[in-house]
Amino acid sequence: QVQLVQSGAEVKKPGASVKISCKASGYTFSDYYMHWVRQAPGQGLEWMGIINPSGVSRSYAQKFQGRVTMTRDTSTSTLYMELSSLRSEDTAVYFCARLNYYDTSNYVVFDIWGQGTMVTVSS
Amino acid sequence: EIVLTQSPGTLSLSPGERATLSCRASQSVSIRFLSWYQQKPGQAPRLLIYGASNRATGIPDRFSGSGSGTDFALTIGRVEPEDFAVYYCHQYGSSPAFGGGTKVEIK
């Protein structure tokens, strides 16, 4: 079935970097834009950025510019998100999500989500 | 940047009651880009409504969406026990954004 499976939980110290993976299966990975969304404990959803199907083009939320890098490996159908200079406020669950177009491209949705990866930043 | 404001923050209801959740945008949003998601504790969000008023596959017809421009709403006709969750509206513009969420809890 169509699914996104993310890597496991991470614990990092302030100032370190973390790289999370998101492996796609059940569909043609290189046909879809992908996004990352995060959720701090007890908080709402926060959009982080998008990467195009080929991986050549990316766009990041201004808040994360300079600290986030999104990449993808079409040979393994895997998406990556690396966040650097971690601080305690980056403690959150990070989700990958597939962008899809419904009804002959009239509508835009996040239709498939990974299960989430908990990143804890603590000294 | 479009900001989405959801109200109320929390809605306390008994099963069988009707729920109306509001999502107000700081600028006009195309209905093409307005969707609603449901999230239960420890789970990823799930697509409920797309295009402001279209139910996603497998979503019961007690869920309905409406609105245009800057004002949108999600209605649950009669809340079932499995509907107690947090609901987020979302706009997919040049800078995608989610509303702050409305928690539907058991009264």
Image: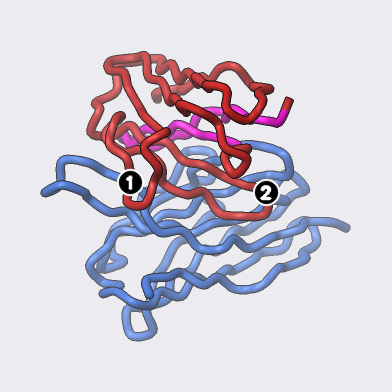
Work out whether residue A58 can be spotted: yes
| Chain letter for the residue marked with disc 1 in the picture | B
**Amino acid type of disc 2?**
Pro
Position in image of residue A50 (x %, y %): 38, 52
**Amino acid type of disc 1?**
Ala
Query: Observer-nearest residue: B19 or A17?
Result: B19
Would you say A6 lies left or right of B65 here?
right
Q: In terms of secondary structure, what is the magenta stretch mainly?
A: strand
Residue A93, label in figure:
none
Q: Check the image and tell me how it is coloured.
A: by chain
Query: Observer-nearest residue: A17 or A104?
Result: A104
Residue B56, label in figure:
1
Between disc 2 and disc 1, whose residue precedes? 2
| Chain letter for the residue marked with disc 2 in the picture | B
Q: Residue at x 62, y 37 (%)?
A: B84
Instruction: Point out the residue furthest to the front here.
Output: B16
Cα distance between the residues tagged 2 and 1: 21 Å
Query: Is-magenta flag for residue A62?
Result: no
Q: Give the magenta range.
A: B86-106
Query: Which chain identifier belongs to the red chain?
Result: B
Q: Which residue is mark 2?
A: B41
Residue A40 falls in which quadrant of the image?
A: top right
Would you say A108 lies left or right of B39 here?
left
Q: What is chain A's hue in the picture?
A: blue
Position in image of residue B69 (x %, y %): 28, 15
Q: Residue at x 37, y 29 (%)?
A: B64
Q: Residue at x 35, y 27 (%)?
A: B65
Q: What is the secondary structure assignment of the residue under circle 1?
A: loop
